[in-house]
């Protein structure tokens, strides 16, 4: 990626425990070079996101080519009336202000929420007992087509669309004919 003059932002998760621990320690002891906080209220839920950018120090071997910054994203708010806080750490080959990283990371989550969350939570894709040949892939493609059709026709809530169309075969056929 670096050789092709592109940059990356990659989440550091528990599968890289040693690197994650080093980044967590650095963000506890060092001061960020840039930070930004965003507060958002949607459907009565208030979410606060703080993005902090830290310079990579030479002592930390990331195992990744071209790492220049560490990014810490802290999210807090309430879900179902219960408070929560989560922290996610990233490495990046780019030196930039926190605002730019915040926009990019938030944009990624928007895509995640629009497609993967709907498929996982609403359509329960991860719980389906489909394991034969390409069946899981084929059904996933069909679900993507259905989601796109529903969004094309203005359904912003897939759950609502399911309720509305579940007993309306003629309505479903009408969507397919359009």
Image (cartoon, rainbow, N blue to C red):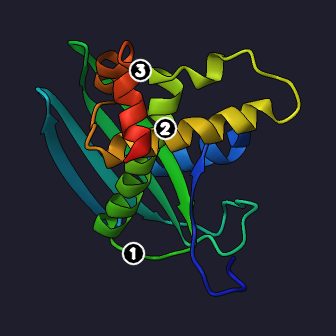
Camera-side mark, 1 or 2: 2
Q: CA distance from mark 2 to mark 3?
A: 14 Å
Q: Provide residue 79's location: percent of width, then percent of height.
A: 27, 19
* Residue corresponding to mark 3: 169
For marks 2 and 3 on the same chain, the one whose residue lies earlier in the sequence = 2
For marks 1 and 2 on the same chain, the one whose residue lies earlier in the sequence = 1
Q: Residues within 10 Å of mark 1 (few under 14, many from 20)?
A: some
Q: CA distance from mark 1 to mark 3?
A: 52 Å
Can the viewer see residue 64 in this picture? yes
The residue at the point 28 percent across, 66 percent down is 99
Q: Provide residue 83's location: percent of width, then percent of height.
A: 25, 18
* Residue corresponding to mark 2: 146
Residue 74 vs 9, above or below: the answer is above
Can the viewer see residue 31 in this picture? no
- Which label number is shown at residue 96? 1
The residue at the point 34 percent across, 49 percent down is 152
Q: Residues within 10 Å of mark 3 (few under 14, many from 20)?
A: few
The residue at the point 35 percent across, 53 percent down is 106
Residue 78 vs 101, above or below: the answer is above
* Left or right: where 32 falls relative to 133: left
């Amino acid at each position: 990626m670096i050789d092709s003059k592109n940059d990356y932002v990659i989440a550091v998760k528990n599968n890289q425990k040693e690197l994650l621990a080093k980044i967590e320690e650095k963000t506890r002891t060092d001061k960020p070079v840039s930070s930004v906080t965003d507060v958002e209220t949607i459907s009565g839920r208030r979410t606060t996101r703080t993005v902090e950018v830290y310079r990579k120090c030479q002592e930390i071997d990331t195992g990744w080519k071209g790492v220049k910054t560490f990014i810490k994203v802290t999210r807090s708010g309430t879900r179902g009336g219960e408070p929560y806080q989560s922290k996610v750490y990233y490495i990046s080959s780019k030196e930039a202000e926190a605002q730019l990283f915040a926009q990019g990371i938030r944009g990624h989550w928007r895509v995640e929420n629009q497609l993967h969350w709907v498929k996982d939570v609403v359509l329960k894709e991860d719980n389906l007992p489909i394991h034969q040949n390409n069946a899981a892939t084929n059904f996933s493609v069909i679900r993507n087509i259905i989601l796109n059709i529903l969004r094309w026709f203005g359904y912003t809530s897939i759950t609502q669309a399911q309720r509305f169309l579940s007993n309306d075969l003629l309505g479903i056929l009408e969507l397919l004919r359009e």
